[in-house]
Image: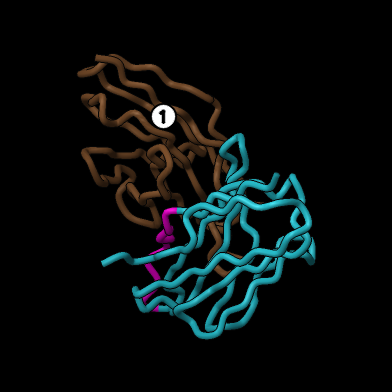
Chain colours: A brown, B cyan
Amino acid sequence: AQSVAQPEDQVNVAEGNPLTVKCTYSVSGNPYLFWYVQYPNRGLQFLLKYITGDNLVKGSYGFEAEFNKSQTSFHLKKPSALVSDSALYFCAVRDGNQGGKLIFGQGTELSVKP
Amino acid sequence: DTAVSQTPKYLVTQMGNDKSIKCEQNLGHDTMYWYKQDSKKFLKIMFSYNNKELIINETVPNRFSPKSPDKAHLNLHINSLELGDSAVYFCASSQSVPGRYTGELFFGEGSRLTVL
């Protein structure tokens, strides 16, 4: 079965510093991987995805993610964090066998302090 | 112009009542979903419909009954509400047609259900 894991419940970063939010995956076949962000009392917003092609994927709000097949990882990164990046981040994998549903990790709370 | 809209945004009700949540998408997508987010923020798929046909039913109690009158709408009716049904319910949509598939799901803003 497809799954993703986010090993950190919380990540704390100082504003201006680089940030990384970790995600590892387990899939059979080629992975379709996604990152979403959820601000308080809001829905999930799509950030970026990896389906095929370059291992470094660029997305919204200056975020990028690196697909690493050998380490089965898809870490989310940003070179310089903003206080407004503080939110809950979800990694997800598409379950190709079941109508395209996304299976989500448990989420990582990112806190960026001034 | 909201892409995926859910109503109501908030629901507070007593145990044993019946309630419905409605969802509409104007993206022209062919697949819609209901997800449940619990108090620990964990997201779990409940149902998925493709062109009005149920394709995913993830062992949800049969008190939950989804209905899709057309591919732009997916409603969720819950009978005999229980305390454990308190959660945020998210509707989402995606395009699954081969050649038009982009992969990502588009989510509504959520409907927060509180059962007292």
Foreground of the two, A103 or A40: A40
Quarter holding the C terminus of chain B is top right
Foreground of the two, B81 or A82: B81
**Rendered location of residue B32, percent (x, y):** 51, 70
Rendered residue at 57%/79% (across/down): B68
**Rendered location of residue B86, percent (x, y):** 66, 46
Rendered residue at 45%/50% (across/down): A33
Rendered residue at 71%/64% (across/down): B18
Quarter of the image where one finds residue A109: top left
Q: Is residue A71 visible?
A: no
**Rendered location of residue B107, percent (x, y):** 43, 58
Query: In this view, which residue lies farthest toward the front?
Result: B14
Name the dominant secondary structure of the magenta segment.
loop
State the extent of the magenta-drawn residues as a range: B99-109
Whether B101 is drawn above or below B42: the answer is below
Disc 1: which residue: A21
In the rendered structure, which amino acid carries the disc numbered 1? Val
Q: Is residue B2 magenta?
A: no
Q: Secondary structure at mark 1?
A: strand
Q: Residues within 10 Å of mark 1 (few under 14, many from 20)?
A: many
